Amino acid sequence: MGEEVRQERFGEADFARFAARLGEETEALGRWFDASDPEEGGECAGFELELCLVDGRQRPAPENQEILAAVADPHLVPELSRFNLELNSDPHPVAPGLLSALRAELEALGARVDREAEGRGLHFLMIGTLPTLPEAALTLENMSPLHRYHLLNEEVLRQRRGRPLHLDIRGRERLVTDHADVMLEAAATSLQVHLQVPLARSRRFYNAA
């Protein structure tokens, strides 16, 4: 996950090979579970945080490629849209001081991103859905220029036989819309915490998640 895909098209032979490899990996994982020490692996945690790049009027700014090139840090990676970025931490032991270590790492990398953004008249927001995001910004022109995203879009639409994605959210207000590509996903950003636990407890954590 996160590595660029070099192929531009996939055929039935590719999908068959993928299914075979997935089966092999699943069997290898089962053998590893059977042979490993149940207490192997300590507890550690990290995070990934998705950001929105915005201009001075809080509108989405599709300039993540420029920020990525300027910061040049493997902890900073692109997201689906050009107006999103993702910050990643290193894993840290689950021990006293964990949250302080994660906060320090976030602040250090975030400050570097903010400096580069400010130099371009931009800044970033840590927010779930940007209130100023118009649906007109959710276009393929604003998709990050990576093969894996364009291939994802093509495959989702192929599986749906070209039918648009239908969104129907009912709450205090209601949002109903049809969208012709996967860029609706760029409307949602999040903080995701990753947790590693000993093998003996992994099943309970997985089921709880």
Image (spheres, helix red, strand yellow):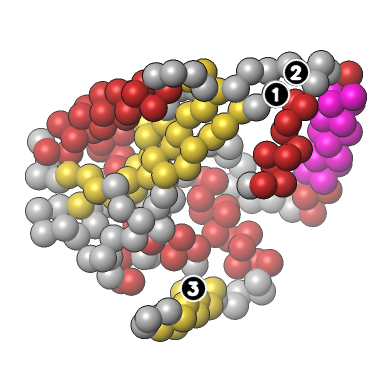
Vertical relation: 26 (above or below) 148: above
For label 1, the crowd category at 10 Å Cα-Cα, with few meaning under 14, some 14 to 19 and many 20 or more, is: some
Instruction: Considering the whole magenta stretch, tell me its main secondary structure.
Output: helix
Residue wearing tag 1: 198
Magenta stretch: give its range. 17-34
Query: Front-most of 176 and 21?
Result: 176
Q: Which mark is residue 184?
A: none
Contact (Cβ within 8 Å) of mark 2 with mark 1: yes
Q: Nearer the viewer, residue 44 or 87?
A: 44
- Is 24 part of what is drawn in magenta? yes
Residue 34 placement (x, y as % from top left): 90, 24
Question: Between residues 126 and 158, which one lies in front from this camera angle?
Answer: 126
Residue depicted at 36% across the width and 65% down the height: 138
**Horizontal arrangement in the rendering, residue 7 relative to residue 74 (left or right):** right
The verdict on residue 33 being magenta is yes
Residue occupying the point 34% across, 23% down:
100
Q: Residue 180 has which mark?
A: 3
Residue 195 lies in what quarter of the image? Answer: top right
Residue at disc 1, secondary structure: loop
Residue depth check, mark 3 versus mark 2: number of the one nearer the observer: 2
Secondary element type, mark 3: loop
Q: Earlier in the sequence, mark 2 or mark 1?
A: 2
Q: CA distance from mark 2 to mark 1?
A: 5 Å
Q: Earlier in the sequence, mark 3 or mark 2?
A: 2
